[in-house]
Amino acid sequence: MAAVSTRAAYLDEGPGETRGVVTVDGRPERLLIHRDGDPVPLQLGARSIARVRSVETAFATAFLDLPEGGQALLPLRPDSPRPVRGSSVEVEIRSEARRGKLATAWLLGEGQGDPRLIAPGPGMREELLHLARADEVMTGSEARRLADEAEGEVLARTHSLPGGGNIAIEPTRALTAIDVDTGQMTGGDSKRVSRQANLGAVSVAARLLRLKGLGGLVVLDLAGRGHDGAAILAAVRAAFAADNPGVAIGPISRFGTLELTIPRRRSPVLDRMADVTGQLTAQSAAFRLARLLEAEGRSAPAARLEARCAPTVADAFGPLTRRMADLLGSRFRITPEPAWPVDRLEVTSL
């Protein structure tokens, strides 16, 4: 009988940013990020009155104007009445926006009046409890450590497999490619080594795709040849069961690739943290710097603090200045270092 995985939920509330982590057997499986100023009407599960901006009959789609200047797509079902341009409708966000794509809404019925929020989506605590199927959310230093660990895995492209080997996860506009590499694995003939790597890759890939928030079409390039199709497909079904409903799995092709589709619901956390090249954004670095300042301020309550970072990070830190002043007073300063990369951050007591 297969071992039952254990999940737990953690919440880290930092200056201007709240991070939620769900772990599976102690490893981060989900990372949720809410930041000050995030548009509430575009969050998963939010219900609003929206105005129909246009109707594209050929594509069975309507474009919506939401509260706070947000926009969303409304797929039109064959059996539903067609909304009229300029009319008001009540909708719920069913999938959040991602890079280059609008959020998707679900039609609930006719609406009245101007665009406005009716009800926000679930709060982070509620989301974490649901995803972890847990009774409590843990906070404190362990929550921060796990959130930092989760961020590191989200930004990494290559990840180790149990027993050796690794996988590389590369998101593109069209799909997410996962390459399985046996690396320096030993322990018998090549077919046995490849089988071990492929079976290990399936569970690791499922966890990491959930962690990074990646969905849509996924192509898994398996190691070796002559794959045990039945065993691999059974492993895929088990590993991605947590993403149902909506997972579709294809057969292993003669080229040694396996395709599957995973429903997109939340904005990819990778999009929130990194730019199109996969590098940490200045805004994400600014939130990291705020947490470092907060921690140093607690350990040295009477000292003056200096935070050094790249100029772009110093600029992105601007909106956080007042919040940090509420926490630390006026005893900190931000010093831009022109030659520093975005991910280099230092905080010292003076």
Image (spheres, rainbow, N blue to C red):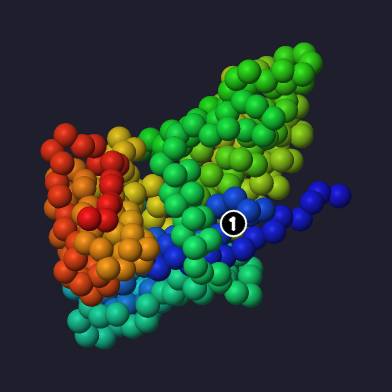
Residue 59 lies left or right of residue 167; in this view the side is left
The residue shown at (46%, 60%) is: 144
Q: Quadrant of residue 79?
A: bottom left
The vertical placement of 276 against 91, above or below, is above
| Residue 197 visible, this angle | yes
Residue that protrudes farthest toward the right in the picture = 1
| SS type, badge 1 | strand
Quadrant containing the C terminus in the rendered view:
bottom left
- Counting the numbered discs, the total is 1
The vertical placement of 1 against 75, above or below, is above
Q: Position of residue 275 (x, y in %)?
A: 28, 42
Q: Position of residue 49 (x, y in %)?
A: 29, 79
Q: Position of residue 122 (x, y in %)?
A: 45, 74
| Residue 215 visible, this angle | no
* Label 1 environment density (alpha carbons within 10 Å; few <14, some 14–19, many ≥20): many
Q: Position of residue 300 (x, y in %)?
A: 33, 63
Query: Dot 1 corresponds to which residue?
Result: 23
